[in-house]
């Protein structure tokens, strides 16, 4: 059954053309209409802005229960210690219920922030089997489309690495939409890298890999393999996979930049995470224009990520408002060219943005950077279905999700002690 958005002020996400119209939304598409059938499902936008919804290029839903957690046993002094004493301590403690709670809460926040498609990179080394399906089911319950993977690594031993390979095989064989996930080069041995590329080829997908996030990744790669990270990935065949995405890419040299540019692979920028971990900032404009934005699990708010990329990128990259907006929207291009499903034109967001100044096609980017934020997200349509209406989830109970997440968060924190 079609959904009709009445009295919409539609903004084309590519041209910024503004059209006051009614919109017919189906499970496959959307188009403008003059007349609305009397027996139709109607949502009155009351003149509010309507545009294409948002997507996240790199998320870690498993970090959702970290908010407010106790301090680590040792205050980290560098990036490797941040991993050791915080994230690798947390992920080892996750069980199936904690994964479910994390996924439900993260999907809830994504939906309420206008995000209808998430590319996630998961880790739970002592609860690997079935973890991707738990996440997929949770996102389906909220109404969010997804592209999932498990974080393969040798850091927890051969058995857990094999369990990660098996989980990819199981999930993708069952029709799940995903990448083959890898942590960073310095925790991935030669055999595991080779197996990952072979598995990606088998399922016609790409790798989703943390790449030179910190200089320590490069130093370890040169020491252990006699080459830098992107060169290693390239030699292994990872850069030949059209769907491969490289996360962070903060510390690339000119040769690596040339490999990335020549391969046509996409980079995902996570500027707030890079700032939080004090690993530096890249000049992506010198690498490629194929850059999209993620959150790295710090939050689920892509409007916030876009503003952060703009504010930080001005000095280092000369990034303009249009450049930040392009990165915000580039994920739609990646999804389309990669053949993944769930990001059609029937994914929309209604913005209750009562601006003190006029919104026009000429000044929309200025409103995007300096005006719009997640508090303006009112109603969200995912694959033709309303999943958030007037600020509230329609397919799940927010109170139940929050209560469950708090219960699992306390269990996780106790376990981490």
Image (cartoon, rainbow, N blue to C red):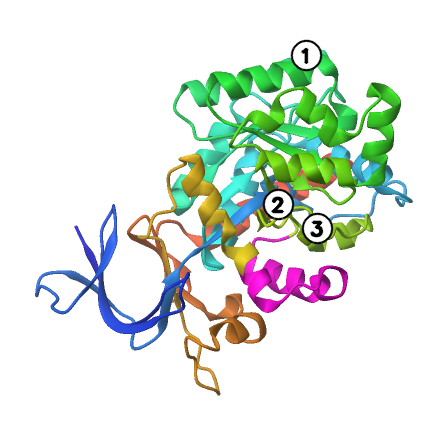
* CA–CA distance in space, label 1 to label 2: 30 Å
Note whether 271 is above or below 210 in the view shown.
below
Discs 1, 3 touching: Cβ within 8 Å? no
Residue 310 highlighted magenta (yes or no): yes
Residue for point 57% across, 26% down: 240
- Whichever of callouts 1 and 2 sits on the residue coming sooner in the sequence is 1
Nearest-to-viewer mark from 1 and 2: 2
Q: Residues within 10 Å of mark 1 (few under 14, many from 20)?
A: few
- Residue 224, numbered label: none
Q: Badge 2 is on which residue?
A: 268
For label 3, the SS is helix
Q: Which residue is mark 3?
A: 286
Please report the bounds of the magenta region as a residue range. 299-325
Residue 341: image x %, image y %? 37, 38
Q: Main secondary structure of the magenta part?
A: helix
Magenta-colored stretch includes residue 217: no
Q: Which residue is mark 1?
A: 159
């Amino acid at each position: 059954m079609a959904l009709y958005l009445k009295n919409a002020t539609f903004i084309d996400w590519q041209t910024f053309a503004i059209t006051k119209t009614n919109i017919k939304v189906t499970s496959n598409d959307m188009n403008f209409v003059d007349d609305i059938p009397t027996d139709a499902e109607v949502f009155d936008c009351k003149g509010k802005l309507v545009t294409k919804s948002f997507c996240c290029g790199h998320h870690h839903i498993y970090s959702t229960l970290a908010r407010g957690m106790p301090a680590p046993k040792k205050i980290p002094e560098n990036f490797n210690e941040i991993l050791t004493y915080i994230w690798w301590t947390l992920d080892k403690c996750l069980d199936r219920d904690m994964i479910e709670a994390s996924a439900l809460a993260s999907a809830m926040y994504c939906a309420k922030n206008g995000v209808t498609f998430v590319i996630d990179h998961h880790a739970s080394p002592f609860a690997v089997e079935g973890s991707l399906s738990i996440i997929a089911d949770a996102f389906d319950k909220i109404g969010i489309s997804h592209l999932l993977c498990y974080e393969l690594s040798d850091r927890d031993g051969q058995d857990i690495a094999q369990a990660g390979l098996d989980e990819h095989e199981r999930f993708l064989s069952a029709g799940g939409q995903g990448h083959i996930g890898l942590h960073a080069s310095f925790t991935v041995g030669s055999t595991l890298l080779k197996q990952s590329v072979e598995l990606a080829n088998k399922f016609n997908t790409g790798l989703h890999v943390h790449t030179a996030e910190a200089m320590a990744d490069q130093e370890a790669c040169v020491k252990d393999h006699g080459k830098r990270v992107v060169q290693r990935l390239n030699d292994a065949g990872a850069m030949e996979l059209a769907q491969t995405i490289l996360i962070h890419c903060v510390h690339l040299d000119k040769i690596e930049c040339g490999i990335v540019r020549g391969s046509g692979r996409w980079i995902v920028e996570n500027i707030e995470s890079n700032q939080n971990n004090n690993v530096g900032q890249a000049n992506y404009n010198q690498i490629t224009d194929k850059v999209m934005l993620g959150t790295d699990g710090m939050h689920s708010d892509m409007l916030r990520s876009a503003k952060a990329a703009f504010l930080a990128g001005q000095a280092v990259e000369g990034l303009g408002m249009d450049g930040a907006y392009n990165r915000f929207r580039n994920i739609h291009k990646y999804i389309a060219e990669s053949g993944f499903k769930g990001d059609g034109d029937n994914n929309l967001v209604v913005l209750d943005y009562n601006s003190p100044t006029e919104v026009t096609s000429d000044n929309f980017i200025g409103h995007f950077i300096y005006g719009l934020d997640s508090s303006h997200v009112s109603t969200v349509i995912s694959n033709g279905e309303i999943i958030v209406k007037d600020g509230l989830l329609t397919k799940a109970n927010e109170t139940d999700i929050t209560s469950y997440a708090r219960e699992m968060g306390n269990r996780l924190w106790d376990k981490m002690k």
